[in-house]
């Protein structure tokens, strides 16, 4: 995986200091330095994190001179943060008022980045944004879009690393004044930096000056060794959906009764062919990029609203509603695995057929005896790995006088979290399936059919999402003592957590009260 960054600046600006190694707070980082602001626009550290900063020329907010600080100084500070919790403290709206608007990308390992967008009033987060990202002081809504479309078209023809570098050296599209390698009367591209990311190291190559002056070899090349990381899974997989094989394994009695035309209908309903076509392409990607790339190919742009995340040392358990099915898992794994590399997900054992997720899944039997899975789940809770669980165990339906609801939540997550003294964090994913899914569910119930026929549509719902911009709300982490104090029984506690989950979108819209509590603070219900 590689990242390329063109820096556009005034021709009169002091030439940047070429990349060097910098050590601070026990974290080693490599970055070029801007002498004027004493900050940077691109950095990588020995934790495997890469930080890229783009100015936002669309937002109008400008801090007063009394408080104004360089955005590059912010990036330099972030690059020396030893853990995610320090990043979270810095990346809060009240801490960013001294900075002009920006977009910040944070890459972790070989995964797609998280994006923070600060417009001077609101700090928004997005998971796995689509490449490329660009900014321009002239026509800031038009030129970045033209560059992105040109880059995507050319990369579709020749998606090689060499072609990507060549594109960053070109004055296209249309004219040098709006080109990827830009050149105008007062400003131009003043450097190109290329980062090559590997499981054990990051290499930074730096070309100084406008690309018309560049030689084939970079002016400076540095390598940064990464701290020991989790072992990488193999890069080639053979995941595929075999409807007949799965039915024979998990429901042999039903499979023996199906006729040839019924098998064909079932394969069509479960979108076996289009799903396998997508998996065939994803099988060429590393396991840790699987969810990110799947999200991008599905055209999703997940947003994240969070005040604070739990520390890994608290052995967090994340509980979430289940609005759409497969997309829920893709979005949450994509987001959580960046902060918690050893994340485990308690989920349907059928997902073990997706080999890229095998190391993530704690399998639970849905078609057989669910109690047989209890020892595996108990072992997972006794470990130190962060856990994600959907306590409802089923996809949400539209309920009369209630709206979208995923039914009662099982108390097991609370029982085991309290027993193992784990923290718990409530998540709410705001998304939904198509109207056809809910219509079929309503018709099925009206005619007294007990089988969940609409579940056959879940693969199609995933391949053609009804909600392109799902929003994830993250609650304040809950200490084990606080979890116990919620109610007298675990069933009451899980009921409280579900109620809290469905409250989160409204809670985040509340204004701070007179005691200056943040809008995400917990209040008595």
Image: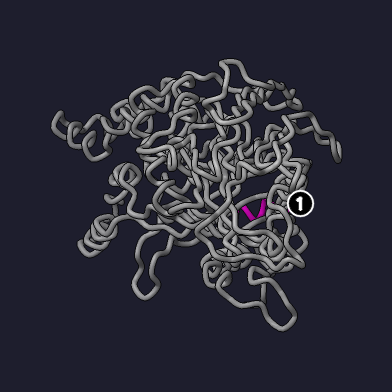
Q: Nearer the viewer, residue 142 or 88?
A: 142
On the rendered structure, is 48 left or right of 131?
Answer: right
Magenta stretch holds residue 414: yes
Q: In this view, does 185 lie above or below 426?
A: above
Q: Let me know if residue 291 appears in the view.
A: no
Instruction: Tell me what residue is drawn at x 35 percent, y 65 percent.
Output: 398
> To which quarter of the image does residue 387 belong?
top right
| Vertical side of 232 occupied by 341: above or below | below
Q: Mark 1 points at which residue?
A: 421
The tally of labels here is: 1
**Coordinates of residue 264 in the picture (x, y in percent):** 18, 32
Left or right: where does residue 473 sit relative to residue 175? right
From this viewpoint, is residue 70 visible? yes
Query: Residue at the spot x=32%, y=42% of the render?
Result: 463
Magenta segment: 412-420
What main secondary structure does the magenta stretch of the protein show?
A: helix
Q: Is mark 1 on a helix, strand or loop?
A: loop
**Of 238 and 278, the residue lying toward us:** 278
Q: Which residue lies furthest to the right in this view?
A: 25
Q: Quadrant of the C terminus?
A: bottom right
* Quadrant (top left, top right, bottom left, bottom right) of the N terminus: top right
Relative placement, left or right, of 188 versus 440 is right
């Amino acid at each position: 995986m590689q990242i390329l960054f063109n820096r556009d600046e005034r021709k009169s600006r002091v030439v940047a200091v070429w990349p060097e190694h910098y050590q601070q707070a026990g974290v080693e980082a490599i970055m070029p330095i801007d002498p004027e602001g004493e900050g940077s626009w691109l950095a990588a550290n020995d934790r495997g994190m890469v930080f890229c900063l783009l100015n936002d020329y669309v937002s109008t907010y400008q801090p007063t001179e009394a408080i104004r600080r360089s955005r590059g100084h912010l990036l330099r500070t972030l690059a020396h943060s030893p853990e995610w919790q320090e990043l979270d403290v810095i990346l809060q709206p009240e801490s960013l008022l001294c900075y002009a608007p920006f977009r910040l990308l944070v890459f972790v390992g070989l995964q797609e980045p998280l994006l923070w967008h600060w417009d001077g009033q609101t700090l928004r987060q997005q998971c796995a944004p689509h490449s490329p990202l660009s900014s321009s002081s002239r026509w800031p809504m038009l030129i970045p879009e033209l560059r992105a479309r040109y880059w995507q078209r050319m990369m579709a023809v020749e998606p090689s690393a060499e072609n990507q570098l060549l594109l960053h050296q070109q004055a296209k599209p249309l004219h040098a004044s709006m080109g990827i390698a830009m050149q105008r009367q007062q400003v131009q591209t003043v450097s190109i930096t290329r980062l090559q990311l590997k499981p054990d190291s990051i290499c930074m190559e730096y070309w100084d000056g406008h690309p018309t002056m560049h030689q084939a070899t970079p002016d400076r090349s540095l390598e940064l060794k990464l701290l020991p990381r989790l072992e990488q899974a193999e890069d080639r997989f053979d995941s595929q959906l075999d409807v007949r094989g799965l039915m024979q394994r998990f429901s042999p009695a039903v499979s023996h009764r199906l006729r040839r035309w019924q098998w064909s209908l079932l394969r069509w309903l479960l979108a076996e062919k289009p799903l396998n076509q997508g998996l065939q392409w994803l099988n060429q990607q590393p396991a840790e990029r699987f969810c990110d790339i799947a999200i991008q190919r599905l055209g999703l742009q997940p947003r994240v609203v969070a005040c604070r995340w739990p520390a890994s040392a608290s052995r967090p358990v994340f509980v979430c509603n289940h609005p759409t099915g497969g997309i829920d898992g893709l979005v949450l794994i994509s987001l959580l695995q960046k902060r918690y590399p050893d994340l485990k997900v308690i989920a349907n054992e059928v997902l073990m057929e997706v080999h890229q997720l095998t190391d993530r899944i704690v399998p639970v039997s849905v078609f057989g005896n669910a109690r047989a899975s209890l020892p595996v789940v108990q072992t997972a809770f006794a470990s130190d790995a962060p856990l994600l669980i959907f306590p409802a165990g089923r996809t949400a339906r539209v309920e009369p006088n209630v709206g979208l609801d995923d039914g009662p939540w099982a108390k097991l997550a609370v029982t085991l979290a309290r027993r193992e003294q784990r923290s718990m964090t409530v998540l709410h994913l705001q998304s939904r399936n198509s109207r056809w899914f809910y219509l079929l569910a309503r018709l099925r119930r009206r005619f007294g059919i007990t089988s969940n026929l609409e579940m056959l549509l879940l693969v199609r719902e995933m391949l053609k999402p009804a909600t392109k911009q799902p929003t994830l709300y993250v609650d304040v982490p809950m200490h084990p003592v606080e979890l116990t104090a919620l109610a007298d029984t675990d069933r009451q506690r899980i009921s409280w957590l579900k109620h809290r989950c469905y409250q989160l979108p409204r809670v985040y819209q509340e204004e701070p009260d007179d005691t200056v509590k943040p809008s995400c603070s917990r209040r008595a219900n």
